[in-house]
Image (cartoon, grey):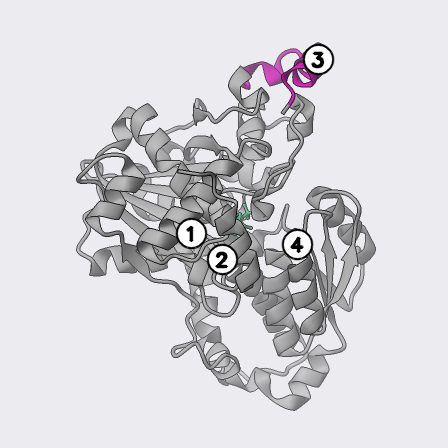
């Protein structure tokens, strides 16, 4: 980051839009790590009743997941029950102390970096949206007799039938992979539009499973826009729209039920006296936003959701700080959206997500790339967690949260690790080597 360039762009930006961008702190504009307490946050009881989605919608999503359990168990032998879920891991006291910067902190890891089938949190949203599409087609065409097990959707004749349809998606990598794996496994054609920052191995892996990969010179937002335009109005195709899909969002939201079950099994009390702090890496916002909606519906103000973004791509922070009337991108304040956290390299947040959970998010914390690599290395060496840089982001936010959000010290802390298990070994070694010296 060259401060001089940044300054001049800020002045231009301010001249164009004096009011909206005023609320964005100078440290954020300068690409410095920041703890941004959300001034728009309101009590859950005030916000939840006015939202378009409620507990019934998330419960519906959960029920659909369960309808698909027999099919998923048949398609993916690694899934014993068909449930795509990860463990809730307790960090050992010494590791927890390292993460929190002090002794005695209760730090848990929601281990979506090891989520079965796709090794990242996109298995919740992306896989779910493909299942919704498959169910819609199958019901419309009468392929699903009422009461029949969904396991029947894996029969060869249905695979051939699905093959007449295309599932398309724009992605920096993980969403394309998750949608691609699920859709190809069911027999769909798959087309993935990738941004310039998508990693080569992610493109290669998609081609390996028979997906068509279309590469774009621009960033993630432009890849999504191109794909959206290419598939608009096609009756034989479905475009998974990361910026505005309700199904994607609700698929993520159902994760709240998984966490609730695990917290109960671990006898962890969550109430206003024993708050739950959840650290969520944020790209376009669908995954952390969906999880936030689900958790707020279950726990209200007893849960505090803290979004974590790279200093170069704080798109949700910028959108919330500027207000929701118009889209704002990180380029508008002179940031460049260049980060090693490819899963978080998003310049413009989802307005659906910002509009839904904008008043429910506790804070947004921005972190430097060097810290992603440092935490990636430390969690590997100390706890054996195999993370990709995006997933390490949440660890980098725990200390800043505990020192700057005063009330964040006690209670339970859950760090949501969002991807990494399927990182090729040489990529993982490169990430380990990128950690700065101790
Ligand atoms: C996609 C992704 C995120 C963030 O999800 P969004 O829905 O884009 O906010 C976080 N971590 C990883 C590893 C991801 O792939």
Vertical placement of residue 386 versus 286, above or below: below
Q: Which of marks 4 and 2 is nearer the N terminus?
A: 4
Q: Which quadrant is home to the N terminus?
A: top right
Identify residue for label 3: 8
SS for callout 4: loop
Identify the residue at horizontal 59%, vertical 32% (top origin).
Answer: 312
Identify the residue at horizontal 65%, vertical 51% (top origin).
Answer: 172
Q: Magenta residues?
A: 2-24
Cβ of mark 2 under 8 A from ligand 1: yes
Q: Which of marks 3 and 4 is nearer the N terminus?
A: 3
Identify residue for label 2: 420
Vertical placement of residue 328 versus 49, above or below: above
Identify residue for label 1: 417
Spot occupied by residue 24 in the image (x, y as percentages of width and height):
55, 19
Front tag of 2 and 1: 2
SS for callout 1: strand
Prevalent SS, magenta region: helix
- Which mark is drawn over residue 199? 4
Whether tag 3 and tag 4 are in contact, CB under 8 A, the answer is no
């Amino acid at each position: 980051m060259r401060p001089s360039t940044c300054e001049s762009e800020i002045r231009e930006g301010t001249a164009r839009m004096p009011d909206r961008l005023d609320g964005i702190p100078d440290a954020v504009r300068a690409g410095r790590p920041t703890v941004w307490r959300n001034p728009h946050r309101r009590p859950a009881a005030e916000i939840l009743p006015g939202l378009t989605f409620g507990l019934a919608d998330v419960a519906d999503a959960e029920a659909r997941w369960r309808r698909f359990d027999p099919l998923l168990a048949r398609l993916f032998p690694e899934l014993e029950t068909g449930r795509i879920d990860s463990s809730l891991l307790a960090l050992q006291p010494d590791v927890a102390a390292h993460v929190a910067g002090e002794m005695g902190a209760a730090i848990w890891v929601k281990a979506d970096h090891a989520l079965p089938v796709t090794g990242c949190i996109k298995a919740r949203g992306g896989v779910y949206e493909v299942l919704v599409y498959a169910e819609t087609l199958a019901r419309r065409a009468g392929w699903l007799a009422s009461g029949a097990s969904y396991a029947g959707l894996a029969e060869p004749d249905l695979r051939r039938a699905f093959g007449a349809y295309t599932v398309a998606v724009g992605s920096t990598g993980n969403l394309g992979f998750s949608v691609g794996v699920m859709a190809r496994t069911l027999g769909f054609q798959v087309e993935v539009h990738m941004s310039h920052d998508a990693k080569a191995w992610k493109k290669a892996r998609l081609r390996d499973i028979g997906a068509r990969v279309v590469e774009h010179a621009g960033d993630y937002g432009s890849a999504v826009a191109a794909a959206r335009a290419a598939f608009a109005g096609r009756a034989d195709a479905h475009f998974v729209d990361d910026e505005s899909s309700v199904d994607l969002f609700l698929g993520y939201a159902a994760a709240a039920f998984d966490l609730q079950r695990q917290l109960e099994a671990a006898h962890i009390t969550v109430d206003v006296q024993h708050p739950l702090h959840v650290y969520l890496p944020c790209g376009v916002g669908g995954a952390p936003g969906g999880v936030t909606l689900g958790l707020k519906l279950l726990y209200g103000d007893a849960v505090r959701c803290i979004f974590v973004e790279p200093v170069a791509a704080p798109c949700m922070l910028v959108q919330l700080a500027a207000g929701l009337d118009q889209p704002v991108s990180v380029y508008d304040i002179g940031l460049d959206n260049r980060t090693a956290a490819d899963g978080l390299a998003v310049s413009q947040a989802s307005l659906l997500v910002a509009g839904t959970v904008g008043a429910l998010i506790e804070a947004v914390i921005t972190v430097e790339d060097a810290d992603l690599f440092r935490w990636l290395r430390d969690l590997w060496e100390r706890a054996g967690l195999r993370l990709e840089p995006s997933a390490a982001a949440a660890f980098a936010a725990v200390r800043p949260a505990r020192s700057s959000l005063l009330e964040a010290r006690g209670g339970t802390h859950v760090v949501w690790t969002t991807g990494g298990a399927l990182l090729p070994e040489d990529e993982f070694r490169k990430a380990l080597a990128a950690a700065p010296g101790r």
